Image: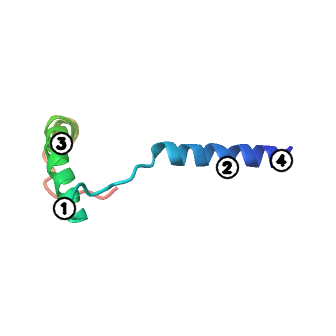
Amino acid sequence: MKNKKAIAVIMLMLTLLFAFSSTALASGSSGVSEAIEGTWDEASGEIRTVVDNVVFPAIDMILAIFFFAKLSMSYFDYKKHGQFEWSATRF
C-alpha cells in the first residue's frame, strides 16, 4: 500500500514537472543572451506596471497605518502624562 502511494506521488510530481517546465530556445542565428535580453525587455514593462500599481500603494497603506497608530499612541500618551516623550522608549 505504501509503495502504491509513493509511486502515485512520484508520478504526480513528474507530471507537474513536465507540465510546468518550458524550454528557452534562441530563435534564428541570434544567441541565447539576445533571447534573454528580449524576454527581459518584454517583461520589464509588466513588472514596472505591477510595482507601480500594486507594490507601492500597498507600502503606502502600511506606512499610513503605522503613522496613524503612532499618532494615536502619542495622543493617548500625552493625555496620560501631560507631555510628549521625545526620547525612544524601551519595551
- Which of the colour schemes (rainbow, by chain, secondary structure, one colour) is used? rainbow
**Mark found first going from the N terminus, 1 or 4:** 4
Determine the CA span between mark 4 and mark 2. Answer: 12 Å
Q: Where is the N terminus found, in terms of image quarters?
A: top right
**Mark found first going from the N terminus, 1 or 3:** 1
Percent from the top left, x then y, of residue 56? 16, 41
For the point 77% across and 44% down, the residue is 5
**Mark found first going from the N terminus, 3 or 4:** 4
Q: Identify the residue position indicated by label 1 in the image.
A: 30
For the point 16% across and 34% down, the residue is 53
Label 4 neighbour load within 10 Å: few <14, some 14-19, many 20+: few
Q: Where is the C terminus found, in terms of image quarters?
A: bottom left
Percent from the top left, x then y, of residue 61? 19, 35
Determine the CA span between mark 1 and mark 4. Answer: 50 Å
Residue 72 vs 34, above or below: the answer is above
Percent from the top left, x then y, of residue 15? 58, 43
State the mark number for residue 2: 4
Q: Identify the residue position indicated by label 2 in the image.
A: 10
